Amino acid sequence: MTTPSVQRSGPASSRTTAPAGAAVPAPSGPDPRLTSAVMADYRGCFGCGEEAAGGLRLRRTGVDDGAVTAEFDVRAELQGAPGLAHGGVLATAMDEVLGTAAWLLGKRYVTGRLETDYLAPVPVGSTVHLRAWCTGVDGRKAYLEGEGRVGGPDGPVAVRAAALFVEVPEEHFTRERVKHGHSTKERAN
Ligand SMILES: CCCCCCCCCCCCCCCC(=O)SCCNC(=O)CCNC(=O)[C@H](O)C(C)(C)COP(=O)(O)OP(=O)(O)OC[C@H]1O[C@@H](n2cnc3c(N)ncnc32)[C@H](O)[C@@H]1OP(=O)(O)O
């Protein structure tokens, strides 16, 4: 597998850089046993859920040369500065595609640290083309990098990110809901 390369103007921090020799697994697919019990509410995901009012509605489009690909449209309600995508929206999109690349390694991961570089403004009305890939796994820690391009999949990079994801047990997704009295069944009704 080849790892896509992104030209950086500066390095990711040491906290999001895989240690030397860390394995780089190829994305395969989420183990259904990992997803069945925790994905029931996922249509409400702010990043990709079709039922999340005001969400990004990010679309996963596939895996290309070791990288997960996705895209989303910058609707007017996602703007920050007039006519431009909000930076937090772009960070959320990076979190979502990086998280997808992590889950495709076959284990459950959550974001521990997310670093985002904004290289160019992203106009309302544009489509952001996202890619994310793993740079190494070290025990429970998975290191991911990604980028978002505008004007097409090969357009200029407007945003890039590096992140550390941490593997968690299934209870990670249920214990807080139990604590706060929020069940999947209630949500589905
Ligand atoms: C076709 C497609 C189908 C796809 C189908 C599935 C799709 C599915 C997509 C999902 C896409 C979701 C995309 C959104 C993903 C979120 O947004 S997740 C939500 C945001 N994140 C969170 O809520 C996490 C909150 N934090 C926590 O729960 C805990 O702090 C953590 C991260 C689990 C770590 O806690 P812990 O388990 O007690 O572990 P801990 O010992 O503290 O840390 C483990 C290691 O990580 C390191 N670490 C932890 N945090 C950090 C940090 N911030 N900086 C540096 N190091 C750290 C520790 O130093 C430690 O290192 P070692 O000592 O082992 O060397």
Image (tube, rainbow, N blue to C red):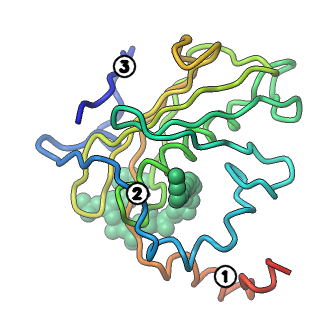
Question: Which tag, 2 or 3, sits closer to the chain's start?
Answer: 3
Q: Residue at x 65, y 88 (%)?
A: 178
Q: Amino acid type of disc 3?
A: Gly
User: Where, by quadrant of the figure, is residue 38 drawn?
Assistant: bottom right
Local packing at callout 2 (Cα closer than 10 Å; few below 14, some 14-19, many 20+) is: some
Residue 78 in the figure: left or right of residue 131 = right
Residue 168 spot, x, y in % from top left: 41, 71
Local packing at callout 1 (Cα closer than 10 Å; few below 14, some 14-19, many 20+) is: few
The residue beneath circle 2 is 29
Mark number, residue 10: 3
For the N terminus, the image quarter is: top left
**Of tags 1 and 2, which is closer to the observer?**
2
Compared to residue 16, the image places residue 152 above or below, namely: above
Give how far apart the Cα atoms at labels 3 and 1 are.
39 Å
Compared to residue 64, the image places residue 96 above or below, namely: below
Residue 26 in the figure: left or right of residue 133 = left
Local packing at callout 3 (Cα closer than 10 Å; few below 14, some 14-19, many 20+) is: few
Within 8 Å: ligand 1 and the Cβ of disc 2? yes
Q: Say which element carries label 3.
A: loop
Question: Which tag, 3 or 1, sits closer to the chain's start?
Answer: 3
Q: Amino acid type of disc 1?
A: Arg
